[in-house]
């Protein structure tokens, strides 16, 4: 187990500003460069995926499938209640626009990091980040920015997106071309969707739809949030093995009002540099200039993992590979009976809690 912890620390420290998370099934538009040779678009940290429907298996991918650079599409500098993201401050841990939006997710059971801090106190340093009021943080693009910033140049907390003939750092995911996935969903049915984290910053997520004939804006996706089947959530490893888990879902204090969000069931580990066992969570005021910018900076999970660790399933928290490979989360969502038939784009939005980041991917589907 000590060897596992040591490996976990090394893996997370190399991924602090690299890949994040991505939609795996259906295949997202953001994996557009998957057809290129690995050497042409190899990021510093490959995007993990534990579902072979996400593309061809790659000899270079320890995760078992090829999701290209889908986990490098996101935005940062996005505080709750702000009109826009500044695209620079991923870990500042302050209200970046100063408008004073209060967190609506305050129950420790619904928080994924720093649970022991009193909500709203100076020690609750993550209270301005997106998951603390799901859906209320702005985005730059509803389908993400390549590398997390709108500029070609790298800035703080950038993602090392490798420019290709298909996309370059700063491109908008909403402008990517359709990527046919052969995914057909039936009106009134329940369908399976899968996402995966490469570097875990906690938080929670939602699936939404936008007609393919409309502009892929946040406003469009907010009109059609999908409801989860709360009885059907599972973990999946890249050998196809699954473990049913009890998910945690939120419908209050969210946008769109009354919509359903799911808490990230995979607890983060090692949220900063110098991570060491037993460090716990250091109380941090989170003010500008503070040299303490990260809580839960320990290889221990930030909350109880959803599976027993140390057995044949290995680690099931953080972004660490288990004995069976990287871990994905499989959900079931409900397709409304009243939708018009036709082509849609599925939006996956992950609101982080440990960082001022929103991760977004989009995928093409056909509803009949």
Image (tube, rainbow, N blue to C red):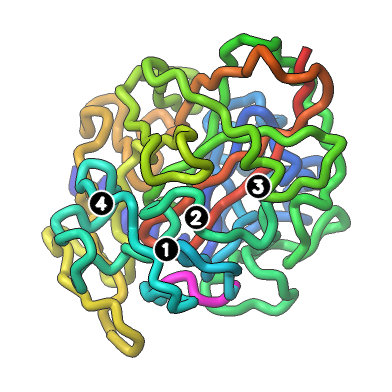
Disc 4 or disc 3, which is closer to the eye? 4
Q: Which residue is at 66% across, 41% downward?
A: 221
Mark 4 secondary-structure assignment: loop
Answer yes or no: is residue 7 visible.
Answer: no
Residue 355 is marked as 1
Q: Earlier in the sequence, mark 4 or mark 3?
A: 3
* Residue 222 location (% of width, % of height): 62, 42
The answer to whether mark 4 and mark 3 are in CB contact below 8 A is no
Bounds of the magenta span?
Answer: 87-91
Q: Earlier in the sequence, mark 2 or mark 3?
A: 3
Q: Which residue is mark 4?
A: 106
Q: Magenta stretch: residue 250 in it? A: no
Q: Earlier in the sequence, mark 1 or mark 2?
A: 2
Answer yes or no: is residue 79 visible.
Answer: yes
Q: Which residue is mark 2?
A: 136
Q: CA distance from mark 1 to mark 2?
A: 15 Å
* Residue 273 location (% of width, % of height): 32, 71
Q: Residues within 10 Å of mark 4 (few under 14, many from 20)?
A: some
Q: CA distance from mark 2 to mark 3?
A: 24 Å
Q: Earlier in the sequence, mark 4 or mark 1?
A: 4
Q: Nearer the viewer, residue 64 or 210?
A: 210
Q: Nearer the viewer, residue 59 or 14?
A: 14
Mark 2 secondary-structure assignment: loop
Mark 3 secondary-structure assignment: helix
Q: Which residue is mark 3?
A: 70
Q: Residues within 10 Å of mark 3 (few under 14, many from 20)?
A: many
Q: Residues within 10 Å of mark 2 (few under 14, many from 20)?
A: many
């Amino acid at each position: 187990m000590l060897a596992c912890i040591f490996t976990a620390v090394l893996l997370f420290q190399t991924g602090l500003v690299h890949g994040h998370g991505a939609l795996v099934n259906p295949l997202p538009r953001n994996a557009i460069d998957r057809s290129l040779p690995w050497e042409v678009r190899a990021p510093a940290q490959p995007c993990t995926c534990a579902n072979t429907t996400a593309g061809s298996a790659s000899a270079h991918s320890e995760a078992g499938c090829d999701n290209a650079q889908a986990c490098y599409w996101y935005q940062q500098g996005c505080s709750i209640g702000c009109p826009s993201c500044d695209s620079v401050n991923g870990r500042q841990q302050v209200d970046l626009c100063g408008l004073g939006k209060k967190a609506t997710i305050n129950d420790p059971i619904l928080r994924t990091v720093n649970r022991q801090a009193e909500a709203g106190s100076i020690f609750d340093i993550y209270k301005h980040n997106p998951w603390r009021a799901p859906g209320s943080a702005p985005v730059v693009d509803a389908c993400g920015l390549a590398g997390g910033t709108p500029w070609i140049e790298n800035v703080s907390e950038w993602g090392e997106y490798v420019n290709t003939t298909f996309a370059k750092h700063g491109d908008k995911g909403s402008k990517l071309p359709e990527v046919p996935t052969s995914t057909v969903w039936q009106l009134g049915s329940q369908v399976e969707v899968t996402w995966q984290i490469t570097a875990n910053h906690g938080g929670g997520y939602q699936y939404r739809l936008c007609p393919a004939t409309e502009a892929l804006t946040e406003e469009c996706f907010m009109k059609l949030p999908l409801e989860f089947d709360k009885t059907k959530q599972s973990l999946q490893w890249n050998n196809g093995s699954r473990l049913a888990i009890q998910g945690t879902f939120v419908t209050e204090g969210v946008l769109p009002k009354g919509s359903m969000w799911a808490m990230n069931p995979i607890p983060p580990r090692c949220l900063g540099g110098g991570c060491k066992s037993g460090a716990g969570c250091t109380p941090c005021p989170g003010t500008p200039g503070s040299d303490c910018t990260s809580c839960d900076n320990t290889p221990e999970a930030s909350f109880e993992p959803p599976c027993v660790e140390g057995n044949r399933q290995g680690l099931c928290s953080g972004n660490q590979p288990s004995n069976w490979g990287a871990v994905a989360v499989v959900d079931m969502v409900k397709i409304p009976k009243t939708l018009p038939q036709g082509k849609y784009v599925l939006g996956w939005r992950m609101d982080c809690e440990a960082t001022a980041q929103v991760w977004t991917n989009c995928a093409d589907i056909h509803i009949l």
